[in-house]
Amino acid sequence: MTDISRRGLLKTGGLVGTALLSGGLAGTGFARLAAAQDDPLYAAARKEGALTLYWGSYEQQTMEAIRDAFKAKYPGIEVQLLRQASQTVYTRLRLELQNGVAECDSLGTTNLLHYTELKKIGALAAYDPPDAVNLPAAFKGLDKDAMYHVGAISLTSINYAPGKVSAPPTSWMALLEDQWKGKITTGSPAFSGDVASWVVAIRRKYGDDYLRRFGQQKPKVGQSNVDTVTDILAGERVVGSGAPFSYTLTQKAAGNPIDVSVPTDDAILNLGLTGIPAKAPHPNAARLFTNFLYSKEVSDILSRNFWPTLRTDVAWAEGRSLDQMKWFRNTGDDLAAEVAEGIAKWKELVR
């Protein structure tokens, strides 16, 4: 324990001693806690004592694991997690801003439009998390003013029920075949940023005629793309479009009858983003959590739950990587406008 200062031990002795007696710390766990105790940002966050997360990125299980890992590393900060569809948590934040209420400390959604709108009205605080250096190069520095950062890397694919589908659709175009009419479940771009990203990509690839024909397939439209998994497992539909890659693999690993078909015309990669509201009641805790997202602890959780990791030194589950699959990511200066237009076209052609 030569790396732990005498002052640090005296300052945190009660906390560390309690943890040791309870059997909750050993080896590297003790060293990590001691290191955290010497972090001035943690000291400031612990004085605040609370953190409220509004998150639409990741599914409930993964977000709860991230929350619990944060609480374990940084005792003394009570964490409240609201995990709902991206548009739902964003709408809640906007209503709070409108009514002069400040409850949200960290926003995590899958829709770029949320952050460009918040930035435009001065509702985001700048923060440059130091551990973001561990991100893959392509996902660093998304905003030149450091108002928002990548919080999740998601892939949108096709889900299906193996016992009910002998030959799943192999491409987005294949979903338009007659055999899938009335058998598709999908999320809504008005609620899910991942689905909105999928709609933008589909319009870029195939135009609005695709959405028109997709609407004629009479899909069941939920909110979050996670709803596609729920529908398939409940037997309400057999194929999911605009569906989550990682969450589906988690359900498959748990023994549930669902699988993934990676489209030959590209899985759609979307970035979940995160930002700190300018009026966050616990800004230091929010900064601490933002930086924690790029820790090895979080990427280990992501790997266990089949999500792309946020560090170059932590491998994905099953040895997967972006290099092994065909994928497409929407980029460009007018992306926010394309998201808004895509949602409008969806409401017109798919509903």
Image (cartoon, helix red, strand yellow):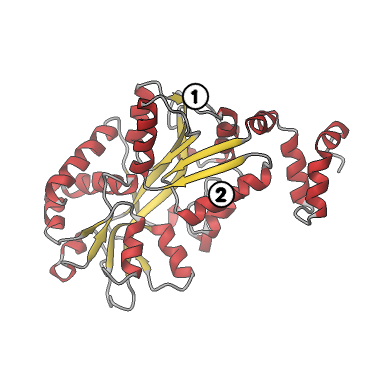
Pinpoint residue 240: horizontal percent, then vertical percent. 29, 62
* Rendered image quadrant of residue 35: top right
Q: Which residue is mark 1?
A: 126
Q: In the rendering, which numbered label is found on residue 327?
A: none
Residue drawn at the location 63% of the way across and 35% of the way down: 49
Residue at 80 percent across and 44 percent down: it is: 16
Question: How many other residues sit within 10 Å of disc 2, few (<14), some (14-19) or many (≥20)?
Answer: many
> Dot 2: what SS?
helix
Left or right? Give the position of 271 relative to 73: left
Task: Determine which residue is flagged by label 2.
Answer: 66
Q: Nearer the viewer, residue 185 or 153?
A: 185
Q: Nearer the viewer, mark 1 or mark 2?
A: 2
Tell me the kind of residue under disc 2: Ile
Q: Is residue 261 left or right of residue 295?
A: left
Residue 334, quarter of picture? top left
Tell me if label 1 and label 2 are in contact, CB under 8 Å. Answer: no
Q: Is residue 321 above or below residue 97?
A: below
Which residue is drawn at the image coordinates 57% and 47% (left, top)?
67
| Horizontal relation, residue 136 to residue 156: left or right | right
Residues packed near mark 1 inside 10 Å, few (<14), some (14 to 19) or many (20 plus): some
Amino acid identity at mark 1: Ala
Q: Is residue 147 left or right of residue 298?
A: left
Can residue 168 be seen at all in this image of the molecule?
yes
Q: Is residue 28 above or below residue 245?
A: above
- The N terminus, quarter of image: top right
Residue 165 percent coordinates (x, y) = 28, 75
- Judging from the image, what secondary structure is the residue with disc 1 in? loop
Relative depth, front residue between 55 and 138: 55
Image coordinates of residue 348 in percent, x first then y, are: 12, 45
